Image (cartoon, coloured by chain):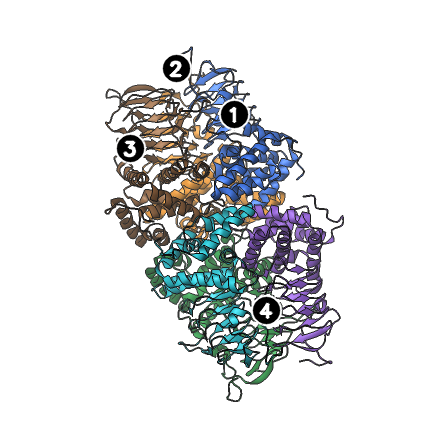
Chain colours: A green, B purple, C cyan, D blue, E brown, F orange
Amino acid sequence: MSTDTPQHDFVWEQIRHESASLADREPLLASHLHATILNHKSLENALSFHLANKLASPTLQATSLMELFWNVFDADAFVRDAIRADIQAIVDRDPACDKFSTPLLYFKGLHAIQSYRISHWLWYHGREELALALQSRISEVLTVDFHPAARIGKGLLLDHATGVVVGETAVIGDNVSMLHEVTLGGTGKERGDRHPKVGEGVLIGAGSKLLGNIHIGDFAKIGAGSVVLDDVPAHTTAVGVPARIVGRARADNPAQAMDHRLLINGGGI
Amino acid sequence: MSTDTPQHDFVWEQIRHESASLADREPLLASHLHATILNHKSLENALSFHLANKLASPTLQATSLMELFWNVFDADAFVRDAIRADIQAIVDRDPACDKFSTPLLYFKGLHAIQSYRISHWLWYHGREELALALQSRISEVLTVDFHPAARIGKGLLLDHATGVVVGETAVIGDNVSMLHEVTLGGTGKERGDRHPKVGEGVLIGAGSKLLGNIHIGDFAKIGAGSVVLDDVPAHTTAVGVPARIVGRARADNPAQAMDHRLLINGGGI
Amino acid sequence: MSTDTPQHDFVWEQIRHESASLADREPLLASHLHATILNHKSLENALSFHLANKLASPTLQATSLMELFWNVFDADAFVRDAIRADIQAIVDRDPACDKFSTPLLYFKGLHAIQSYRISHWLWYHGREELALALQSRISEVLTVDFHPAARIGKGLLLDHATGVVVGETAVIGDNVSMLHEVTLGGTGKERGDRHPKVGEGVLIGAGSKLLGNIHIGDFAKIGAGSVVLDDVPAHTTAVGVPARIVGRARADNPAQAMDHRLLINGGGI
Amino acid sequence: MSTDTPQHDFVWEQIRHESASLADREPLLASHLHATILNHKSLENALSFHLANKLASPTLQATSLMELFWNVFDADAFVRDAIRADIQAIVDRDPACDKFSTPLLYFKGLHAIQSYRISHWLWYHGREELALALQSRISEVLTVDFHPAARIGKGLLLDHATGVVVGETAVIGDNVSMLHEVTLGGTGKERGDRHPKVGEGVLIGAGSKLLGNIHIGDFAKIGAGSVVLDDVPAHTTAVGVPARIVGRARADNPAQAMDHRLLINGGGI
Amino acid sequence: MSTDTPQHDFVWEQIRHESASLADREPLLASHLHATILNHKSLENALSFHLANKLASPTLQATSLMELFWNVFDADAFVRDAIRADIQAIVDRDPACDKFSTPLLYFKGLHAIQSYRISHWLWYHGREELALALQSRISEVLTVDFHPAARIGKGLLLDHATGVVVGETAVIGDNVSMLHEVTLGGTGKERGDRHPKVGEGVLIGAGSKLLGNIHIGDFAKIGAGSVVLDDVPAHTTAVGVPARIVGRARADNPAQAMDHRLLINGGGI
Amino acid sequence: MSTDTPQHDFVWEQIRHESASLADREPLLASHLHATILNHKSLENALSFHLANKLASPTLQATSLMELFWNVFDADAFVRDAIRADIQAIVDRDPACDKFSTPLLYFKGLHAIQSYRISHWLWYHGREELALALQSRISEVLTVDFHPAARIGKGLLLDHATGVVVGETAVIGDNVSMLHEVTLGGTGKERGDRHPKVGEGVLIGAGSKLLGNIHIGDFAKIGAGSVVLDDVPAHTTAVGVPARIVGRARADNPAQAMDHRLLINGGGI
């Protein structure tokens, strides 16, 4: 694989450095760390190896998947950048994670996003059936259901990840943070554009349901457990079932701040 | 298996026709399509094969499960009809799905319902322990937890499906649509009839929790993210935490319309 | 394994007695019951066997995990007591369960708690990396995400369990009942103490999100689908998005009563 | 499967009777015995189940193989008779085996013969490639290499079986006994008829190599470790490297007698 | 497991010492070495772990086998001694092996002998059916077919091992060396004592077939490819098809010398 | 992988052409043929994929092996040539094989040789332990036991292959044909050069044992079932136990002619 990775691949170097140290400290995992990370020449190879082993089934062997994933990563520079941005987003925003290797090895949110990115490439390169097979497998193994046709920016944090659903015509901007059990769903039976459009830097709390072709403005915040059926302006906070706007978002960049509290006019709820 | 399938089995013929075409277009999946669909003489055989491979474990081999599933399908004409109605429901109501083969191959909601239908038959034919073992395996693999004793009509759409929970004494009428993370739960420790009774043509939005021995009338709609603790009359819409009735349902048949918006007197919420 | 189990181990004796009877009635499961339960000398051995088979992966072989789990159970008397209290809690509080063997064999909530208890021991005995690997595997297989550092009392009922998330600095008292899709989450990026503290005997309804370093008093009740961002006093009921206190809890011990209805001053909501 | 098995299927009834008794005595194997034997309606179904589980690979799933094997057994009455004759041969001739169930469950010689019989049917029904795939898998799993095109009679005993090789144009009569490491090989590069023709009731000792289009007469005996390059008349014994005729066979039916001693004129060698 | 291993267990200490060094040099195998050897407290535990993983099948899970093997090793001091003698024999006699860990990790001859020793214990403790299931699995996986009832001394070297067959009433003395494809077979259909009795320190060359209730005297040598049908006196060499005595064995202890040449009166054959 | 395969890779083109045709004719194998052959850019990639899937174990994942094998093939031009010569040898010499794809897909002799070639490279590049692990796995899965240190030329045909053993210091020239159960063994316990040296174009019949540091001259023939303890001159035929020279080989190139008959002075034996 001739992937043209950057000469100074900071994320990959951190991951290798951490893994070598971990392999020394935990012998039960040493070979796993070698096989998954240290044996590989690039982050793309390591990720292909790891995802292929996770998603393999009697229908799709790990070895076939690994080659397929390499080819996709090799073909798409956007995806290669996005992998690094997604890992960096976790280290920047998740206080329980202080290593670059931890999400690569253990976070099913990251695994699901990168697997979706592969299915997305397949979908737009004439292999819709294989994309659907992959989507189905991601949903079974990782309980995250992204339609391959959805369009997702870089720097997405999918924290905990269980139960996330993102529909066919959904769009997610750069640097969004979404907690588990978030839905970007459609409404009605009409085909065509029917799912939410989420702007840059948005934070969506755990369990929130955003339904229909609505717009969530940049740097908006959706409180946990909300049901959003209408547009949410930029820099505002929406909360409730159904959701209403309760004020300006506390932080300039809610996705970065990861603050789920709901300050309205300086008070808490 | 001498299953007396209808002479003109429209759903099965569609599935076979589509699969032959897909096998030509995607060689990585060709054998899978042959093994899962084209090699079989009936929809029941194909489904037994597919579910057995998904639910197999060290405890229950795929070959044992396949034979067990054949026998159940062979014994129960209601289940044979329900399989076709459930597939037809998806094609009719899910705008992201325009093939009959797609849900059979890839939708864990359909897989969970049909697996439940088998566990239900076992439960009422003196094999409760095997039914519980199957329920447990469905919950692990497909993250859908239907108690085998629950009673469920035909034409159920279980969209996305992750996290659905349906309790022991729940009843679901024909042609219901339920989104992911819906719960039909009990309340309190008393044994006996303690779970919701859901009428025909009801639509239940993502994440809604219906708790206790309450009645949801025919063609009612439950908004996403609602918590329903009381009866909901037919043709009305309930929404909120806890839910209240907000008006008449927008559509005559909400499960069919799949419209999650909450119009009251012509306005949106 | 020299585990010093009590001379009269009531829970274990019940499980063995029930399993022998089940093995006679359901031949397809007879060997499984023998292998999982009847062949073992103690509940700890049986549980190690069962969990190891569930959580095994190409990275962590079942045989390695089984030995590891034995060693942890052998080392920690608190965990040995807690296993029994957790099983007893299910039999006491879940009306769909009238056997001690059923949760051990089939309930992924119980499997997730006991697996967490092992990861917790590893975390506090210098093997954080192995604890994270185990957490990741529990989240994949059982869709329950407990951080190994969280502190959890005895007698926890995790009913249905899909989608439960418990953060790094969360604390859960004894005899708590939590339904599926409950989150004890953090808020903000600050490290340090940032997750809920849940008192004794609390009942948390399905889908509720408790966020931040808040205190839920003893014997409080959180209604299903609620979003709790502030302290909840002992013996009170909180409900809504965001949640507010709606009155005194109906039962003296809500976790025990498992009553999800929301009576205020004698009336229903 | 509508296989028209005999009304009184003695072999199958013996196997079922023995298995029920064994399941009671050895709990670790009880479910295995149920799954492999007691759950099935016919010997053909049981054998399909057992062989499919043995020969399954990532390329050929057990469930696919089981259906394929059923279809072959259903189509070919000769094979159905031969299965019973092969099992009866073992019970009649192998002093270490006094049960009908033992070879079905445990003898790889029997497993290899029946798997070959399936590959043979495929070869002569236009599916040579699948026959070769099956031959390859039999050789890997059971270390027995029968070319699918070879023609083999009923009542073949393949004792111990490791390393047996039978070439493309070989013919084996009814009621032959062959020990392990026997080769019926070709010589030279010419295509066409180039392998041994073995008559009825022949006994071939362990490790013997029979090479070329030679004829072994009915009821002949080939001593262990012999290399046979020329015809061997009926009722004679051949021995040595290369083999020579050392006299009349000691028994009228060597395959039945299983006597590997080499008496010549009343003396031993 | 309270196995009373010797205070200074030289073989086990060597194996641990070598494995620690190997784990440092070959990262791809490091975790394997830890899991198989370094994590264990005794040679018996390590061997149980390793054999259970090799012989596991859908019928017999690795975790079940591991516990079974521990129990057998715990119950039988002879077997515990024999394991060490068998490993020492390989290091003493096989010039291609200079480590104690190599046979434990990689030699299927050693794996087959120790697995047989377990099946032998089961056979004589009332679990014949399980012994036969184990024999069958050893023959499939390791292509070595020892009947569980055979009696085998300590210090057996089974070099390369493929195709070895040892019958029900065979007896093998201490410190014997047998190459691959050796058969100790019966002759005739009579039950009862019908297999070879092999004395101490005997060397049996590759491919030799010993048939019938014959006696091979102490320190005799059987040339490769021989067929032995009669007694062989102590300290002599037999060779040929059928074998004849060609003189005194070249070495006082042929099994130890491993010299397969056939010098008679100073000349070669 | 930048393997510099020849511009016109005749063997690989044949394999691809045949596989495309087979995939059309046998749908059960179509995906397998695509995954194993048609998806790959080079013979080396296809072979790495296929061998990795065969030799994978809980210790060595298929994905790790595939990458390892690619790297070895990439590093060693001799091995790349030898793969093609070995396949060509089968098509030239085996009358039962008229396709280039058949040995690649189905012949365990070819699989064993190429796996050995990888282990050989590892042995001489400082990874002896990994080479031994691979040798052990080849012996288990393919029942062929080549010591990684042995030196083997191009164009080796290993027909049927079960039970072949080749020792540490053995040398095999170009274009040799060896049947199953052939041993190139040592004799005695001295380390150092102790195994046979086999010249070019030699044919070794099934079951023959060649023992000690002897020389087999170019184009010699060893009859089936022979035991060879002394040098065999070029162009001669040796046969018997122990073997003696019986005359000039019938063919100028016995390995090519594959004629196992033993004509001496125009007569047969």
Q: Are marks 2 and 4 in contact (CB under 8 Å)?
A: no
Circle 4 sits on which residue?
A: B187
The residue under label 3 is which amino acid type? Asn
Numbered disc 3: what chain? E
What crowding class fits label 4: few (fewer than 14 Cα within 10 Å), some (14-19), or many (20 or more)? some
Give the spatial CA distance, label 3 vs label 2. 30 Å
In the displayed structure, C242 sits above or below D200; it is below
The residue under label 2 is which amino acid type? Gly
Examine the rendering and report whether any part of residue D129 can be seen: no
Give the spatial CA distance, label 1 vs label 2. 26 Å
* Marks 2, 4: nearer the viewer: 4
* Marks 3, 4: nearer the viewer: 4
Circle 2 sits on which residue?
A: D268
Q: Are marks 3 and 2 in contact (CB under 8 Å)?
A: no
Is E79 or B122 nearer to us in this picture?
B122
Left or right: C242, with F135 as reference point = right
Q: Are marks 3 and 1 on the same chain?
A: no
Is D179 or E264 nearer to us in this picture?
D179
Q: What is the number of the mark on residue D92?
A: 1
